[in-house]
Image (cartoon, rainbow, N blue to C red):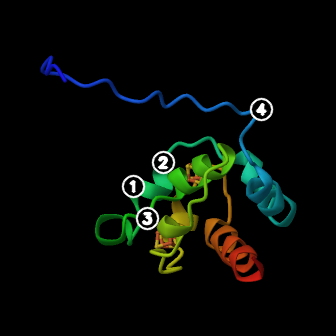
Amino acid sequence: MTDFGYTLSRSSTVNLDEADRSLWLRLEKLEPDLRLCMACGSCSASCTAAELGGMSLRKVILDLDRGRDPAPIVSACMLCGKCSMVCPRGINTRHLILSLCRIYEKK
Ligand code: SF4
Ligand code: SF4
């Protein structure tokens, strides 16, 4: 194979018509405030488990919305509640993560 000195990245386009958003819909029933998230990233910036555990609530919510399972990221959360204090939309993010964990337990 010829080496052109570069590679092509796979498209990151998400087809929302085909994405399995069942997890997002289940969480939305338990936590209607999920709809208020504007993906600002304040929760991720203040997260205790971000650097060492790779936790990012913003990414978790976006993954759920796009039909991806964020379970490996969620498992790093320490439920400290710092993200709840900084969310500009007043979402009880700690409770939201707890509800997501309960969904995983029932799976
Ligand atoms: S701080 Fe609140 S609004 Fe911002 S990304 Fe996190 S959950 Fe969403
Ligand atoms: S509750 Fe979880 S997501 Fe929120 S700041 Fe603490 S470790 Fe991060």
Which amino acid type is marked by label 2? Gly
Direction front: furthest residue: 1
Which amino acid type is marked by label 4? Asp
- The front one of 67 and 90 is 67
* Mark 3 vs mark 2, CA separation in Å: 12 Å
The response on whether ligand 1 sits within 8 Å of label 2 is yes
Label disc, if present, on residue 55 of the rendered structure: 3
The residue carrying mark 4 is 17
The residue carrying mark 1 is 45
User: Could you tell me residue 85's position as x and y percent?
Assistant: 54, 65
Disc 3 crowd rating (10 Å Cα; few below 14, some 14-19, many 20+) is many
Q: Say whether disc 2 or disc 4 marks the residue closer to the N-terminus.
A: 4
CB within 8 Å, label 2 to label 1: yes
User: Could you tell me residue 28's position as x and y percent?
Assistant: 81, 57
Kindly report which numbered mark, 3 or 4, lies closer to the viewer in this rendering.
4
Q: Which quadrant would the N terminus be assigned to in this image? A: top left
Q: Residue shown at 50%/75% (left/top)?
A: 75
The residue carrying mark 2 is 41
- The front one of 93 and 86 is 93
